Image: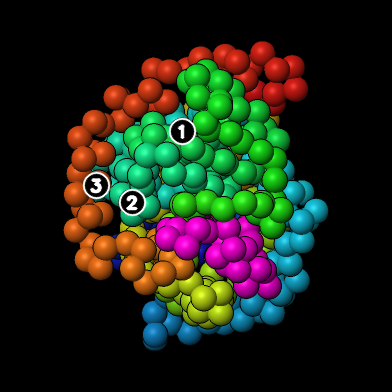
Amino acid sequence: MRRYGNASPVTVPVTIRLVDRITPWRIAANPVKGAGEAYMDGRLVIEDGDIQSFLDLIGHNARWDADNPTRVALWRAQRIGSKLDVWNWQRRSKRNVAHHYDLSGSLYDLFLDQDRQYSCAYFQRADTSLEQAQFDKKAHIAAKLSLEPGQRVLDIGCGWGGMALYLHEVADVDVLGITLSEEQLKIARARAAAAGVADRVQFELMDYRNVTGRFDRIVSVGMFEHVGPPHYRTFFRKCCDLLTPDGVMLLHTIGRADGPGATDPWLAKYIFPGGYVPALSQIVPEIERSYLWLTDLEVLRLHYAYTLEAWLDRVNRNRAAIVALYDERFVRMWQFYLAASISAFRHDGHCVHQLQLTRKRDAVPIVRDYMLAGERALNASGPEASTNVAGKDSWRNEAAKDPTHAS
């Protein structure tokens, strides 16, 4: 047994055991991929602490800091090796999405909130419940969209339909939600039907590049990470074409405060093939070239760390149920994914950006007061009042009737 480093008030002591002689070499050759696979396979055993405390320790020592050469050395090779993985042509995009989002619906029920919001929540306090924080996220976004009754809204990457249904409910708008996940499409349509709004909240299996028509509002939450830098100009020009002259768009995406980087090879292989977290320096030039106004920018820093910690806690509490769905290796993979993500938002340069975009400089008021007033009005109802969230599970029953539904 070997001991490294000194006790620190910001980390928890961790003891690991490597079960064979080849594992250290695999980790040394490719640290993130090697460690992730070793943990999944049971070749890296954590005897004191857990996967979160282990990766928190690693993250602290490899943290984004001007005087930390360890981080620079670890990331240089990954930046070179990740260049080809971000070319998300249409066929490849659908395959990449299916890899992650077409898993069993029961899996997502075991760790997400009841509305299946699979993106960063909005925590007004660190101790806010996950349900409340996800509701607050939807209200926060709706206020920035400055919606009016009867408007037409496009939801790019609509997930299981929660945002689209919420926007219709609170603002009386018509929504088209698009996804590349067949499982998400089934559930989103079932939810709209169960709520009796399928004529006004519609969902299609469609790539954003194939959408036609004009929309008063566009919202995209947690989808831009799957676009890939080579396609950013196409994405923003398409959005500009789809917006009406007075239209408003809200883009919610994970971002990098530390500049352009790389998707680590473990995450690219097992969780998000084709995924990439962009820096603002990669996004803004393509917004400029698309003749869009960046009318508001907000940076959410620790919000995703809180979200991921809530998800990991639920995964740990429901471990037996997830093992029954898949197996032990899968649940260790999921734990590693969530714990590594927490470390990225705690120690690395990861954050969340919310960008409000318009075609005209005066499409929204020139001061931000309208956002706060709108958000307060929406928050007054609370998550329990929503007809599409807590206590309204008929859509789950309808989806379960489909023999092809994974859950």
- In this view of the protein, which residue sits in the foreground, 355 or 128? 355
Residue beneath disc 3:
374
Of the two numbered discs 1 and 3 on the same chain, state the one appearing first in sequence.
1
Percent x, y of residue 228: 65, 66
Asked if the stretch drawn in magenta spans residue 246, the answer is: yes
**Vertical side of 66 occupied by 256: above or below:** above
Which amino acid type is marked by label 1? Leu
Q: Secondary structure at mark 3?
A: helix
Q: Residue at x 60, y 68 (%)?
A: 237
* Residues at discs 3 and 2 in contact (Cβ within 8 Å): yes
- CA gap, disc 2 and disc 1: 16 Å
Residue beneath disc 1:
165
Q: Is residue 35 visible?
A: no
**Vertical side of 336 occupied by 111: above or below:** above
- In this view of the protein, which residue sits in the foreground, 364 or 96? 364
Q: Which class describes the residues within 10 Å of circle 3: few (<14), some (14-19), or many (20+)?
A: some
- CA gap, disc 1 and disc 3: 18 Å
Which amino acid type is marked by label 2? Ser
Q: Indicate which label's residue lies in the foreground, 2 or 1.
A: 2
**Magenta stretch bounds:** 220-248
Quarter occupied by the C terminus: top right
Q: What numbered label is drawn on residue 146?
A: 2
Percent x, y of residue 195: 48, 20
Percent x, y of residue 394: 51, 14
Q: Secondary structure at mark 1?
A: helix
Quadrant hosting residue 113: top left
Which amino acid type is marked by label 3? Gly
